[in-house]
Image: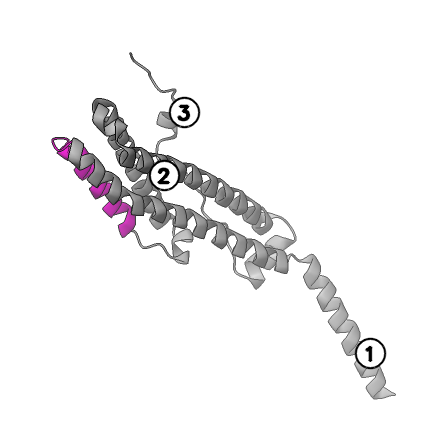
Amino acid sequence: MVMSLMRSMVGVVLLAAVLALSGCGYNDLQGLDEDTKAAWSEVINQYQRRADLIPNLVNTVKGYAAHEKDTLESVVQARAKATSVQVTPELLKDEAAFKKFQEAQQGLSSALGRLLALAENYPNLKADQGFRDLQSQLEGTENRITVARKRYIDKVAEFNKMVRYFPTNLTAKFLLHLEEKANFTVADEKAVAKPPEVKF
């Protein structure tokens, strides 16, 4: 009788614990944490794809625009800087390192923009099939980077809400020791918000 009562009480306690855990967001938080890591991995994957294409693009342009040495060197240096930042899961937790990574990628984007603008000055370069293919691949990669960053931003927003909302914030803080994740930012929001000036 006593054993039967004890088993019943243990069963009730276990059932209550399972029900409590299902309402505390434990699994949802774990799932969202994994989703943000996967989304971040896709961002890195696309940045790596871009970095892999750049040497081919630079070599193609070199043949046509040898005297544009400064622009070519700036692309090579920006690529080196962007790929030198160690990308680890801890990067997402370190706001300063995350900002440094973003700045390096933005520098590479700017250098690539200048390189592609060079093509306007070289009709033979624009007509070169290899250059056009590389340019098309880079444009596609830039679009993929934008999509991957958007997905990451969405997952981080979803995760951060769970970390902040009650009662899941208690699980996040005390049980899982999770904090809000950093998201993409722009170094100079005023400059980005300003419409571009087009001159003919």
Disc nearest the viewer among 2 and 1: 2
List the residue tagged with mark 1. 8
Is residue 21 left or right of 97 when viewed as pictured?
A: right
Q: Amino acid at mark 2?
A: Gln
Say which label, 2 or 3, has the lower sequence index: 2
Is residue 121 left or right of 143 when viewed as pictured?
A: left
Q: Secondary structure at mark 2?
A: helix
List the residue tagged with mark 3. 193
Where in the figure is residue 130, as x and y percent of width and height? Answer: 28, 37
Cα separation between marks 1 and 3: 64 Å
Disc nearest the viewer among 2 and 3: 2
Say which label, 2 or 1, has the lower sequence index: 1
List the residue tagged with mark 2. 137
Where in the figure is residue 160, as x and y percent of width and height? Answer: 54, 47
Q: Residue at x 22, y 38 (%)?
A: 60
Give the magenta part as a residue range. 65-84
CA neighbours of label 2 inside 10 A, class few (<14), some (14 to 19), many (20+): some
CA neighbours of label 3 inside 10 A, class few (<14), some (14 to 19), many (20+): few
Quarter of the image for the N terminus: give it.
Answer: bottom right
